[in-house]
Image: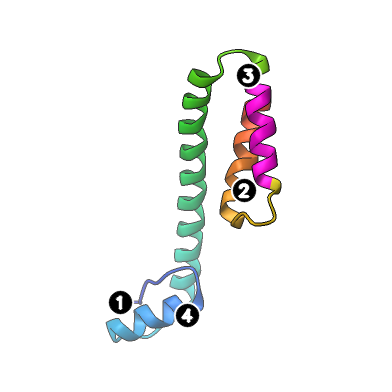
Amino acid sequence: MACRGGSHVIIVALDCALAGRNIDPMDKDLRIIELEREAADIRRAAVSIIMGMAEGIAPTAEGRADLAKGFREAAADPNAAPATSQLALLVAMALERR
């Protein structure tokens, strides 16, 4: 059985070393695809949850526009983690579409 690891080569190698198995490059590629899909699903779920909360906080178009502006500013913050910036931008775009 091939070793299944994370999306980074170091994590895969560590997982495999701990499991005492050889690394199957094809299996690693499939696992990366699975993890990327899971990350996309998590981002969609997070945006959906935040949108539900935002609609309760700002039920008007003007209120949602203000929230979107704030999320865009958060996305542009140079000190924000990349994942935080990405999620803030996704929420801003979702708010702007409503």
Range drawn in magenta: 63-75
> Which residue is pictured at 52% across the width and 36% down the height?
47
Query: Which residue is labeled 2 in the image?
Result: 86
Asked where in the image residue 12 lies, by quadrant, the reply is bottom left
Whether residues under marks 2 and 3 lie with C-beta atoms below 8 angstroms apart, the answer is no
**Residue placed most toward the observer, 3 or 49:** 49
Q: Main secondary structure of the magenta part?
A: helix
Q: Nearer the viewer, mark 2 or mark 3?
A: 3
Q: Amino acid at mark 2?
A: Gln
Residue 69 can be seen in this image: yes
Q: Amino acid at mark 3?
A: Gly
Dot placed on the residue nearer the N-terminal end, 2 or 4: 4
Q: Is residue 70 left or right of residue 13?
A: right
Q: Nearer the viewer, mark 3 or mark 4?
A: 3
Q: What SS does tag 3 mark? A: helix
Residue type beneath disc 4: Ile
Residue at the spot of label 3: 63
Category of crowding for the residue at label 3, using alpha-carbon neighbours closer than 10 angstroms: few (below 14), some (14–19), many (at least 20): some
Q: Where's residue 98, x and y in %?
A: 63, 20
For marks 1 and 2 on the same chain, the one whose residue lies earlier in the sequence: 1
- The 10 Å Cα crowd at callout 1, few under 14, some 14 to 19, many 20 or more, is few
Q: Are marks 2 and 4 in contact (CB under 8 Å)?
A: no
Q: Secondary structure at mark 4?
A: helix
Q: Residue at x 68, y 50 (%)?
A: 77
